[in-house]
Amino acid sequence: MEVKIREAAEDDASACGRICYEAFRAIAEEHNFPPDFPDPETAVTVLTMVLRDGGFYAVAAEMEGRIVGSNFLDERNPISGVGPITVDPGAQNHGVGRHLMLAVMERSKRRGFAGIRLVQAGYHCRSLTLYSKLGFEVREHLSCMQGPAISETFAGYAVRRAAEADLEACNRLCLRVHGHHRGGELRDAVRRDRATVVERAGRITGYATQIAFFAHAVAETNDDLKALIAAAPSFDGPGFLVPSRNGELLRWCLRKGLRVIQPMTLMTGGLYNEPAGAYLPSVLY
């Protein structure tokens, strides 16, 4: 059956959200992991917000006039981020996922992004295979952490809400750590009153758009990052992502009562620099 790809609209949120929930649930349950979305309504709400956001490009896949999948591209930063990509479990094995990936990859290239990135479920071999065939490189093994809020403060590390005036300093920090900034994403988080910064010795040494699945954090040191994590009132969504090879940070999270929910993998195409600091990726990258 022919797969048709078209740009998605807000009216598609209900169909795409239902498929998003069912697809993630089916894959997770097959491997005995909890689903990323607790119910269809949550998935519809998330995709409605994304479809309304001018910073995202969205595509839907159709077969015989019926939506069978969707994909999204975060275009707010110099590096584009893919996801969530989902395919109706009943429409598997027809190349839908490949078509959806090629659509956003071509969009990213056409718009001149320096690189493109995604995070995939580490237990899902089929998606790892697809992304590898499309040219993505594995960069980090990630541990999704969840548990009770830590609610601690660190002497000499002051955590506060981020403000518009902090954007320049935060973007400089991200540039030092990653070789690129995530200014569009950070600005949105500040405007939604979700972002925080940590100050040490009178200057910003770390920031977080939130400590959550769809958020990222960047810091000079692990201690700066710990201060941001410990100040978070909760960890929204399935949890937050810790690079597993950062053993010091991972062990600290475990000692604080957090647990590993699932393994994930950061994959990249185009520009990539080995991080020169501490960081938490989002589920996009």
Image (cartoon, helix red, strand yellow):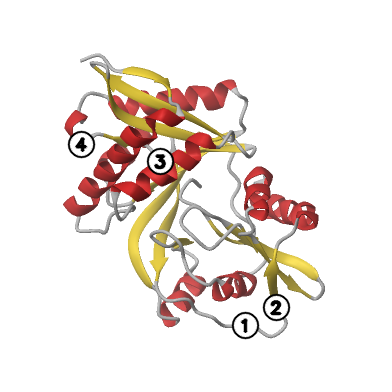
**Which-is-in-front pick, marks 2 and 4?**
4
Q: Residue 170: which disc?
A: none
Q: Residue at x 27, y 17 (%)?
A: 65
**Which-is-in-front pick, marks 3 and 2?**
3
Q: If you read the primary sequence from the N terminus, does the residue marked by circle 1 or circle 3 appear first?
A: 3
Query: What amino acid is at disc 4?
Result: Pro
- Tag 1 and tag 3, C-beta contact below 8 Å: no
For this view, does 68 lie left or right of residue 223? left
Q: If you read the primary sequence from the N terminus, does the residue marked by circle 1 or circle 4 appear first?
A: 4
> What x and y, as percent, mark residue 99?
35, 23
Q: Residue at x 60, y 69 (%)?
A: 225
Whether residue 83 is visible:
no
Look at the numbered disc 1 and give the secondary structure of its residue.
Answer: loop
Density class for disc 4 (Cα within 10 Å; few <14, some 14-19, many ≥20) is some
Q: Residue 157: which disc?
A: 2
- In this view, the residue farthest toward the bottom is 155
Above or below 238: residue 159: below
Whether residue 244 is visible:
yes
Name the residue beneath numbered marker 3: 84
Name the residue beneath numbered marker 1: 153
- Tag 1 and tag 2, C-beta contact below 8 Å: yes
> What x and y, as percent, mark residue 136?
44, 36
Q: Alpha carbon of mark 4 to alpha carbon of mark 3: how far?
A: 15 Å
Name the residue beneath numbered marker 4: 89
Q: If you read the primary sequence from the N terminus, does the residue marked by circle 2 or circle 4 appear first?
A: 4
